[in-house]
Image (cartoon, rainbow, N blue to C red):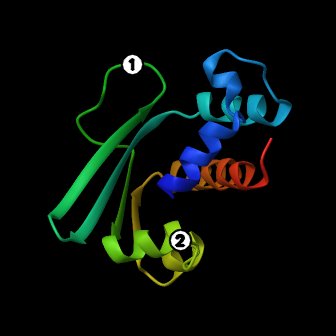
Amino acid sequence: MAERGLRLLRSGRLAALAGGPAHTADSALFERLVGLGGVLRAVITDGQAGDWAIALQFGPGEVPAEPTTTVRVAHDDIHAMSKGDLAPIQAFLAGRVSIAGDLLLAMQLQALLSELLKAGRDGP
């Protein structure tokens, strides 16, 4: 997934984020991203170095003590998803991804990431 993200950044498709010429699709995706609100905590489990977590806040304001949404996924499953071998929705339905809290925030982010990665594969 990181490699695809780097290709997306290098492709210039996100120029609107950096103040360059904006593509209509990029602007629409960026506006949807800016419109999100909440804190997403992602927990990757069962990695060689143990579990790790990151929290991302969307929108302004104080960072709350508890996240709006927590997503838990095993290292091997996140790796399979990043390679395209496992669809996120299939992993969720199979119980390999657990989501606690605001399910809508997780679904909105997943949809945005899918669109951004697709844009990176398709090129400018």
Name the secondary structure under disc 1. Answer: loop
Mark found first going from the N terminus, 1 or 2: 1
Vertical comparison of 19 with 91: above or below: above
Q: State the mark number for residue 83.
A: 2
Q: State the mark number for residue 118.
A: none
Task: Give the camera-side residue of 69 and 21.
Answer: 21
Residue 85, by quadrant, is bottom right
Vertical comparison of 103 with 63: above or below: below
Residue 56 at x, y = what percent?
A: 38, 38
Residue 18 at x, y = what percent?
A: 61, 20
Residue at (17% x, 71% y) in the render: 48
Residue 92 at x, y = what percent?
A: 50, 74
Task: Give the camera-side residue of 1 and 98.
Answer: 1
Residue 37 at x, y = what percent?
A: 51, 33
Q: Nearer the viewer, mark 1 or mark 2?
A: 2
Residue at (51% x, 58% y) in the render: 1
Residue where numbered disc 1 is placed: 61
Position of 90 compared to 61: left or right? Answer: right
Most extreme residue toward the top is: 19
Mark 2, residues whose alpha carbon is within 10 Å: few (<14), some, or many (≥20)?
Answer: some
Position of 20 compared to 110: left or right? Answer: right
- Kindly tell me whether residue 40 is visible in this rendering: yes
- Considering the image in quadrants, where does the C terminus appear? top right
Residue 95, by quadrant, is bottom left
Mark 1, residues whose alpha carbon is within 10 Å: few (<14), some, or many (≥20)?
Answer: few
The residue under label 2 is which amino acid type? Lys
Vertical comparison of 90 with 33: above or below: below
Name the secondary structure under disc 2. Answer: helix
The residue under label 1 is which amino acid type? Gly
Q: Compute the Cα span from label 1 to label 2.
A: 35 Å
